[in-house]
Amino acid sequence: MDKTIVASGCSFTQSDGTWPYHIEQQKYGWVHNVGDTGAGNSYISRSVIFEVNRLLSLGKNPQDIEVIVMWSGISRKEFLSTKRENPMHEYWLKGKDKNWYGNFIHDEHWKRHPIKDSVWIKSSIPYMNWSNKAVTKFLEMYWKHFYTEEESLINTLESILRLQWYLNSVGVKYKMMCWQNIFNKYSFRVPSGWARQEGDEIFGHEIWLLAWRDNKHFKTDRFWPDNATEKISKDTPLLKDIYPNATYLWDMVDWDKWWFYEDDQVEYGGLAEWVCLKARDPWGNGERDPGHPSPSSHRKFCENIILPILDGEI
């Protein structure tokens, strides 16, 4: 099989048992998974461009390459630290947690670029507490003083367009999707018994964060937070309509190259909504990994969505 599939995303793509690992390589081709735990959308875009360019430079026919991208949350951001320019670089590499940094550049043996020279520091999500306190302090300062949702949306759309334009320019087939709905400002009020103050309004990924902590708050029929005011995507505004600086970027995205989960409530859903609302699987992979769908859910998603995409049916 001469075909190569390039997959990228965050931990919903990279971790063991995720959907790329359920693709039958003898039938569909070699899978090059360049996703990374905690990756943001700029990192994801760069990782795909690097890998496709590497394959093309080795003489791979662009018609034998297919890309599937699962974009992450818009709030994530990466900062490049280099030994040459950052006197704190070596100190920042200390700590037991390794998910906060990453490098997608690798050689022909898949040996990653040495982190002692340069590394991408991943902000992941708000309130993340890494064992390296210097990194945690830096990211807390970023979240408190510099983060805005509007700029994050702009950065995500620019990452999408950069990859879209690159893949079109080299003639590589692709399909894009999201780990969950990242384009609507949907929210609900916190019910009693949760970790946050009752009545607080929470948004986007925070819904899943709270649900991960206590699965008993999922409904039996939809696996969705119980006694909460549901306001999912179709009842809430698109972020691009709230932030006019992003509208022109939104209009340039080729939405025909996307897959979304849709039902009577959800318009721009992703893997998370599909698992909870279509497959009706319990969220999380037990105590071992309560924050991600189980390998079984990923297998179902691969069989029902990814393989039909590769077969040209979606």
Image (spheres, rainbow, N blue to C red):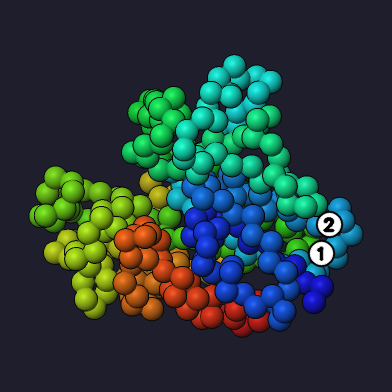
Q: Residues within 10 Å of mark 1 (few under 14, many from 20)?
A: some
**Relative to residue 212, is residue 122 depicted above or below?**
above
**Badge 1 element:** helix
Residue 191 quadrant:
bottom left
Q: Residue at x 60, y 31 (%)?
A: 80
What residue is disc 2 on? 56
Residue 187 quadrant:
bottom left
Q: Earlier in the sequence, mark 2 or mark 1?
A: 2
Viewer can see residue 225: no
Of residues 125 and 173, the one nearer the viewer is: 125
Q: Are marks 2 and 1 in contact (CB under 8 Å)?
A: yes
Where residue 184 appears, as percent x and y from the top left, is 38, 56
Where residue 100 appears, as percent x and y from the top left, is 50, 40
Where residue 5 appears, as percent x and y from the top left, is 70, 67
Q: Residue at x 80, y 77 (%)?
A: 1
Q: Residue at x 83, y 57 (%)?
A: 56
> Which residue sits furthest right?
59
Q: Residues within 10 Å of mark 2 (few under 14, many from 20)?
A: few
| Three-letter code, disc 1 | Pro
Q: Residue at x 52, y 53 (%)?
A: 10
Where residue 271 appears, as percent x and y from the top left, is 45, 67
Of residues 218 and 184, the one nearer the viewer is: 218
Of residues 130 and 204, the one nearer the viewer is: 130
What residue is disc 1 on? 62
